[in-house]
Amino acid sequence: MSHHLNETSSRRETCSPEEWALRVDLAAAYRLVALFGWDDLVFTHISARLPDRHDEFLINPYGLMFDEITASSLVKVDMNGNKLEDSPFPVNPAGFTIHSAVHAARPDAQCVLHTHTLNGVAVSAQRGGVLPISQHSIFVLSSLGYHDYEGVALRDEEKPRLVADLGKNNYLMLRNHGLLTVGRSVAEAFQAMYFFEAVCNIQIRAQAGGGELIQVDPAIIATAQEQARQVTKGQGGSLSWPGLLRRLDRRLPGYEC
């Protein structure tokens, strides 16, 4: 595979305005994952379903670092991970095994985001999983599933179990592996991952302190989703997304090319 990024020409003139907007948001999400330090070289993935197309998706060009990804370099694939347009870059087969299963089972999941961060994997290896010990944790715990590790996700036979474990939740902890979020938009999936990652970071630090941990009352967790709607004024991830794009414009510009 070539190491030159300039092999990808702009796709802005060859796709619909809706697809271009999605490409820009997805490229921004990859850049933000790098900016927040959640990337794992080239080995995690974010996918987005194309507007009004239930069987076409955008995913990362395998081999590019996340801070190199642009709107034009994203690869369009079908449900089986086959490329639907010319691209000098391949697609990660393990990446789309997970993502295609979730997209197929959840029509509401326009975006699926997956990470392998140190603290995320650390908590995924703990039998107790996510503990109710922070304000951040109540939002995750109100919509969380767990999926046991079955090796690198290459086999289609794992898909039904993964989908069943996710259920209607928006957060999935992949045991011994990492974290996954889904959203009705790229912004929503990214904000969910921000909370998921924060929960794991807080938990590892709290446990490292060695003292007894205070747990949140389950009754509070039961109302967490309504509390989240109030805090975000009903806007969900779209409340913070414009500010995140401005941060990218200052620190990692060029994603919108």
Image (cartoon, rainbow, N blue to C red):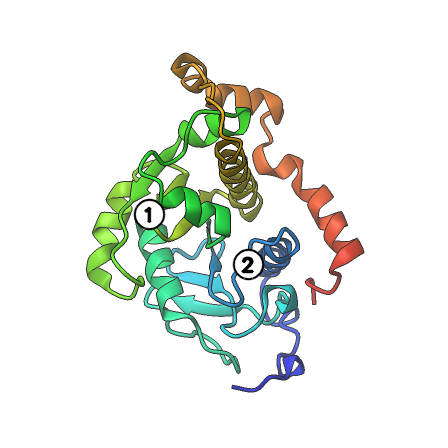
Assess disc 2: are there few (<14), some (14-19) or many (≥20) residues with their C-alpha within 10 Å of its C-alpha: many
Residue 1 locus on image (x, y percent): 51, 86
* CA distance for labels 2 and 1: 18 Å
Q: Amino acid at mark 1?
A: Arg
**Considering only vertical position in the picture, is 208 above or below 132?**
below
**Considering only vertical position in the picture, is 209 above or below 231?**
below
Q: Secondary structure at mark 2?
A: loop
Residue sitting at 39 percent across and 16 percent down? 218
Residue 20 locus on image (x, y percent): 61, 61
Assess disc 1: are there few (<14), some (14-19) or many (≥20) residues with their C-alpha within 10 Å of its C-alpha: many
**Considering only vertical position in the picture, is 52 above or below 205?**
below
Q: Nearer the viewer, residue 170 or 119?
A: 119
Indicate the quadrant containing the C terminus: top left, top right, bottom left or bottom right.
Answer: bottom right
Q: Nearer the viewer, residue 61 or 119?
A: 119
Residue sitting at 49 percent across and 51 percent down? 118
**Considering only vertical position in the picture, is 128 above or below 159?**
above
Q: Which residue is mark 2?
A: 39
Q: Amino acid at mark 2?
A: Asp
Q: Which residue is mark 1?
A: 175
Q: Quadrant of residue 240?
A: top right
